[in-house]
Image (tube, rainbow, N blue to C red):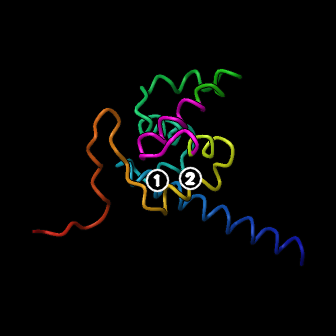
Amino acid sequence: MGRVLLVLIWLAVAVFEIAAGWRVFDKAGQAGWGVLIPIYNAYLLLRIAGRPGWWLLPMFIPLVNMIIGIIVALDVARNFGKGVGFAIGLIVVPAVFYPILGFGSARYVSAGTQEAAPAAGPQAVE
């Protein structure tokens, strides 16, 4: 009985984290389903961070990938209008801070511009 409960809790947390990642990707104008595809989701995260796709290659090099991860977290936080403290949260406790980005009020600001990305879903016609 205890193992079944642990598996159910694990599944609930996994679904919640996937949904949070999906929302983050959607807010940034990327394919939300991309969060489900290994490697492709890292590529999309690089795009959200405003970094070139070739940065995916150094992510396979030990220790270098940690530096790239820190830079990407800083850029993702900045592109969502958050500061260095939030980026540290993305690095240290991503299971808490990515849901805050996905389900919170943070809006994605396109890398290199100050314009907010369009919200997902039907738009009101004025």
Instruction: Name the chief secondary structure element in magenta.
Output: helix
Please provide percent x and percent y for residue 111. Answer: 35, 36
75 magenta-colored: yes
> Is residue 44 shown left or right of residue 37?
left
Please provide percent x and percent y for residue 112. Answer: 32, 32
The answer to which of 101 and 122 lies nearer the viewer is 101
Q: Which residue was labeled with disc 1?
A: 24
The answer to which of 81 and 3 lies nearer the viewer is 81
> Is residue 59 shown left or right of residue 46?
right
Q: Which residue was labeled with disc 2?
A: 98
Viewport quadrant of the C terminus = bottom left
Magenta-highlighted residues:
69-85
Q: Residue at x 74, y 64 (%)?
A: 10
Please provide percent x and percent y for residue 80. Answer: 42, 47
Up/down of 81 relative to 18, above or below: above
The answer to which of 93 and 59 lies nearer the viewer is 93
Q: Residue type at mark 2? A: Tyr
Q: CA distance from mark 1 to mark 2?
A: 7 Å
Viewport quadrant of the N terminus = bottom right
Please provide percent x and percent y for residue 8. Answer: 75, 72
- The residue lying furthest to the bottom in this view is 1
The answer to which of 75 and 14 lies nearer the viewer is 75
Up/down of 93 relative to 102, above or below: above
Up/down of 23 relative to 28, above or below: below
- The residue lying furthest to the left in this view is 126
Q: Residue type at mark 1? A: Val
For the residues bearing labels 1 and 2, Cβ distance under 8 angstroms: yes
Other residues around mark 2 within 10 Å, as few (<14) / some (14–19) / many (≥20): many
Q: Which mark is residue 118?
A: none
| Location of residue 16 (image quadrant) | bottom right
Other residues around mark 1 within 10 Å, as few (<14) / some (14–19) / many (≥20): many
